[in-house]
Every structure is written in C-alpha cells, then in structure tokens.
Amino acid sequence: MLVILIGYRATGKTTLANLLARRLECEWIDADVAIEQRAGKSIARMFAEDGEPAFRDLEAQVIADLCRRADLVLAAGGGAPLREDSRRRMRSSGKVVWLKAAPQTIHRRMTADATTPDRRPALTEHDPVREIVELLQRREPIYRETAHLELDTEGKSAEELAEVILERLGEDAR
C-alpha cells in the first residue's frame, strides 16, 4: 500500500506521514527531504540558483521514483501535483489524501516553524497570507482532481486525523 499526502505547505503532511507510518508499520518519506538529498542543497537554494522549473523537474523525478514503492507513506511537497504526469502517477499508484487548512492557519503554522525561512522559498511577490490565498485558489482544483480523500485539518490533532484516514481508506491502508 502507498498512501500519499498532498496539500499546501504546513497542512501537516510530514507530521501525519510519520504518525501514519508508525500505525501502518511501514516506512515514510518526506518528498522535500528526498529532493534536497538528491540535489545536495535546500529547496530555497535550488529556487535561487536553478529556478523553479529545474526544481519542478527534479520534484517530478523524485515523485515518480517514490510512487514505484510499496508499504510507504509519502508526504509530497505542496506543488508536487502541479504536473499532470505526477498527478496521474500519484493517483494510480496509491491512495491520495488531500490535507486542507485555512490560509490563516497555514500562515500561523509556517510562522511557528523555524525551518520555513531556510527551506521554503516565497513563491510569489506578495505578502505571505496573500501568497497562500492566491496559490490555494490556483491549486485547489488540482488537489481535488488528484485526491481520493479530502480532509480538513482545522482543530484536529494528528492522532485524530490519522484515525480518520485509516477508517476512510479501510482495509486497503492496513
């Protein structure tokens, strides 16, 4: 079984992937970490030195490789489903769960994460909240098209979310 978590930055993908993997007794991988390892540099540095298109090319390669795996929970980067090939590959390879949160919640979580400035580059010229709102408007139809399951993370603990995912995915996830 392959469970793939998608959604905007700071919606809980990494935290939930770790928890789900423990519950499912399997491995978990944060795709952003795998990309950074393969590139030998941070995502922010890739954006600065190579540009977003080069980053997205590498991201698509890493997603393709990880979608060939089994017994894995994958925390995909927020932009991983942007490419049609990646969307199709994720959807056909496993169960895709879209984690959702309000823009203000996402901003609060990003601000609280000390690694955000070093690892997560700005994606527009706008202030952070406006960037989140704008990108969510663009990405929500893509996330919806990719996901088998949509899950609002507002006001729920990681443990509660893991339980909902396991219940909704049923025996396929166990």
Image: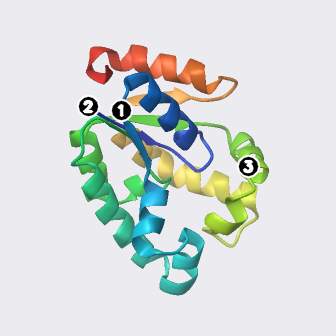
In front: label 3 or label 2 = 2
Marks 1/2: CA distance?
Answer: 9 Å
Placement of 29 over or under 122, stated as above or below: above
Q: Which of marks 1 and 2 is nearer the N terminus?
A: 2
* Disc 2 secondary structure class: loop
Q: Can residue 75 be seen in this view?
A: no
Instruction: Name the residue furthest bottom.
Output: 49
Marks 1/3: CA distance?
Answer: 31 Å
In front: label 1 or label 3 = 1
Examine the image and state in which quarter residue 2 appears: top left
How does the figure colour the protein chain or chains?
Answer: rainbow
Residues at marks 1 and 2 touching, judged by CB atoms closer than 8 Å = yes
Image coordinates of residue 71 in percent, x first then y, are 28, 35
Q: Residue 108 carries which label?
A: none
Placement of 102 over or under 125, stated as above or below: above
The residue labelled by disc 3 is 107
Q: Report crowding for label 2: few under 14, some 14 to 19, many 20 or more residues within 10 A (C-alpha).
A: some
Q: Residue at x 59, y 39 (%)?
A: 12
Examine the image and state in which quarter residue 44 appears: bottom right
Q: In this view, does 165 lie to the left or right of 129?
A: left
Q: Residue 26 carries which label?
A: 1
Residue kind at label 3, given as amino acid type: His
Marks 3/2: CA distance?
Answer: 32 Å
The residue labelled by disc 2 is 1
Image coordinates of residue 65 in percent, x first then y, are 26, 57
- Say which quadrant the C terminus sits in: top left
